[in-house]
Amino acid sequence: MPHALFLLLVVIIPSYLSLSSSVSPISNIHIVASTTTSPFGANSPVPPPTFLQAAKQVKRKVENCDPRITVTVSSSFPSPLPPCDLLLTLGVTPPESLPPPTPSTGRFIISPPSLLPSSTPNDFVDFFSPTTTVLPSPPWSSLSTARRLYEYLLKLFSRHTTDDYATGILLFVNQYSGVKVPWVQHSIDPSWEKGPVQNAKEFAAMIGNCGDCITKCLADETCKACIDALNEIDTRDQVESYRAVTSFESDLLRDFSFCILEKNNIFECSASIPSLPAVTPVPTFRGEPITHDRADQILIGHLQDSDGFTDVVPKSDVSWMVACGANVAYDQFPNQNQLFYKGKGKDMWYDPVFKVKTLDGRTVWCKRHYKVRRVPNTPAQYMLSVLDNGVTSNERWNIVAVADDLSWCVFHYAGAASAVGQSYTGGLLCTRDGKVPPVDVLNGEIKDAFESVDIKLFELFVCDNSVTEESDPPPLDFYRKKSGKRVVSPLA
């Protein structure tokens, strides 16, 4: 890899594999990272971090995803090397004196491109070099499993984001520790790792329960294109899977997904909303304790709406625009418009409208329609739910910080799409026009707000909020008009 030399060292320790308590450690990870500038944060609003700074964020993400995994970060190789299941180096070259793997030590080394681990503790090292003739191995073998994971890790690590590095580590631990990691344990893909019996069982259940939906989808060009795109990837990769889905949205895809995933849960997936990091919503606004009503008005923000603040001017067609986002899968889309508005009673609606550059080269607008409910006794915290292309997502949102004049607002969200076994977290910096606030503001209250929820500024992705062409305006009021609200554009 051109920018981040890395080596993985696995030490299989029998005592770890025998532990079953939910509070007991299942894996020890050691990361050695240099203090030189890294390629992480290439699209952030601040200068890129060092490898060491990035590694510390990878540690936080991994331990938040599964507290049973312990991650240690250092800037140099300790001597002697402490027992660990995984040694990952970033921006440094491992010393030649690093002890080699042997059956007696139980160590595996993955050092591109020569060595790969096998899937059982007793098979210590399989040799594989893509630059030489490779002995054939059956696709269900431990060596083939190792090759597939190895290639997938290379792909994830090449993106240089803390999300992707954390995902890679979680997948590795899930595969080789002998204990399942809930964040990545579920898969809706047929695979050699599942085995022919489980694959056949899932296929039969799909045909038996959803044959009509499958037939209609595969007969439709757009729906089939989405299925073909998903078949080419590991759908646990939330970046690629969500891009595939948003590239080929259709009613047939919604019905296909709903039947297989939501209605019948063919793949027996589950996921819960992450509890870490622990988030405390903003306690005050304009010098007074925050209330539910005030928090609702903050959500409504700059939108031309009778339920919003009367002293916030000028008004806009949207509540907020996303200036930066922290989730590698969901916060990188261009032109992210947010509309929050009241429904019946105390409930609200949230309509994100955003652009997608599809896999086949088109640019399309996508929209979602979330139900928003207050969390009792916790102002500025909300539960959101949405049916997204046939899959239900439930999310917990917090207003983490907001400027008194509503010039900016920081949100944190944690969510789960249980039917596909996916959990996720993210953060958003929103402004009236989608522009990043001045540096002094960014490095002040905004930085503090993000760090309170374990997000560093270099992990943010600046959104492309370039001017929308008049011939292709965003469908901002698609759902809002149906709610019975009287919609008046402040730009009219």
Image (cartoon, helix red, strand yellow):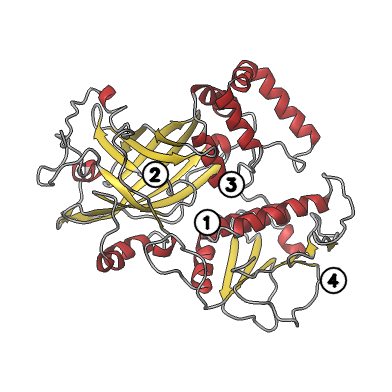
Q: Earlier in the sequence, mark 4 or mark 1?
A: 4
- Could you tell me residue 117's position as x and y percent? 78, 60
Q: Earlier in the sequence, mark 1 or mark 2?
A: 1
> Which residue ends up furthest to the left in the rendered image?
311
Of the numbered discs in the image, which one, if any, rests on residue 245? none
The amino acid marked with disc number 1 is Asp
Vertical relation: 7 (above or below) 162: below
Q: What's the distance in space between the residues labelled 1 and 2, CA to CA?
A: 19 Å
Q: Earlier in the sequence, mark 2 or mark 4?
A: 4
Of the numbered discs in the image, which one, if any, rests on residue 396? 2
Q: Which residue is mark 3?
A: 237
- Could you tell me residue 297's position as x and y percent? 20, 42
Q: Which residue is mark 1?
A: 163
Q: Earlier in the sequence, mark 3 or mark 4?
A: 4
User: What residue appears at the point 46 percent right and 62 percent down from the top-left corner?
Assistant: 42
- Decide: marks 3, 2 in contact (CB < 8 A)? no
Of the numbered discs in the image, which one, if any, rests on residue 102? 4
